[in-house]
Image: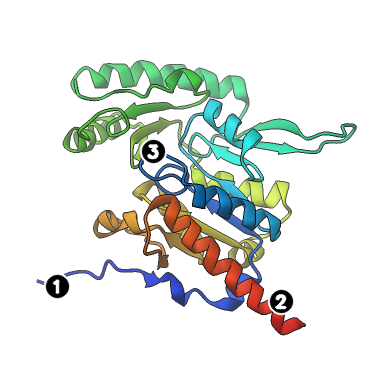
Amino acid sequence: MTIPDCSAIALTELPRQACQTLDFILTDFDDTLTWQGQLPVATLQALSALRADGIKVIPVTGGCAGWSDMIARTLPVDGVITEGGACFITNALVAGRSEPQLTYRFWRDESLMRAEQAQLLAQVKKVLMDFPRLRLARDQSYRLTDVAIDYAQDVKPAASEEKEACLTALKALGLNAKASSIHINVCAPGYDKYTMAQRVLHEWYGLNNDEQAERVLYVGDAPNDESMFARFPLSVGVANIAQYLPIMQHKPRYQTTQPGGLGFAELAQQVLSHRAVSFKEQR
């Protein structure tokens, strides 16, 4: 039997030229910026260093809008794509104001998405009756568009087998369901992390498809990042993605040696060191 190659290229092979033309890092949040439920000091320092160097960081998360609102307001990021691509929250200057203002840009009309969420919630609650170890995520009340099922955040030990069975049941109903490292996220069809990221990069930042391929890097940790890995040539998985690589069709091109936010800090150091070398050469 042939064993498939599930490895990625070492991060140290990330080309210097790619780092020099980089303007954006899009990143998952849970277990990519965080590790063991915390935001490491090294990660926060890396975010600040990237911003100081002119690189815009945009988390792309399945996390709730309420949590993403806090991220957009308080962390050194340029905005947050939240609830799996449903909304872009940015804290930016707008015409007529001297201070940044938080802005929500939904994939579709907000009222329509809220109505869709109510229908999804009713369906999910019926499915969960067959899976007593699974539960709605504690942050469900702070979600505006989707439904999240907790299988590994507050459910300990993780209910991995139940998660797979629940995913099968949800998909059998025709629901759009994907698993992150802690939740099953259920949302209306028509969008995902990539489609909203592409819209944001094009409409908010003015990047065409070729520019996105050259100036954007994506980093993630789980199968729900596959839509991003598939379309951004510059893609990185933090070390803890290794457990999922055998079942993933679209894998990151590069991989860190450290997990979660420590791996993100490792990536930032690699990128910034290449850019610093370029600056010295120009002098």
What kind of residue is marked 2?
Phe
Q: Is residue 93 left or right of residue 153?
A: right
What kind of residue is marked 3?
Gly
1 or 3: tag closer to the N-terminus:
1
Query: Label 3 belongs to which residue?
Result: 37
Q: Residue 279: which disc?
A: 2
Q: Could you tell me residue 222's position as x and y percent?
A: 36, 49
Residue 194, can we see it? no
Q: Residue 47: which disc?
A: none
Task: Sort mark 2 into few (<14), some (14-19) or many (20+) by Cα contacts within 10 Å.
Answer: few
Q: CA distance from mark 1 to mark 3?
A: 37 Å
Residue 46, can we see it? yes
Work out which residue is located at the far front of the displayed protein and give it. Answer: 41
Q: Quadrant of the C terminus?
A: bottom right
Question: Is residue 72 depicted above or below 269 in this figure?
Answer: above
Q: Could you tell me residue 50's position as x and y percent?
A: 63, 57
What kind of residue is marked 1?
Thr
Task: Tell which of 240 and 117 is nearer to you.
Answer: 240
Q: Are marks 2 and 1 in contact (CB under 8 Å)?
A: no
Q: Nearer the viewer, mark 1 or mark 3?
A: 3
2 or 1: tag closer to the N-terminus:
1
Task: Tell which of 187 and 220 is nearer to you.
Answer: 220
Task: Tell which of 113 and 141 is nearer to you.
Answer: 141
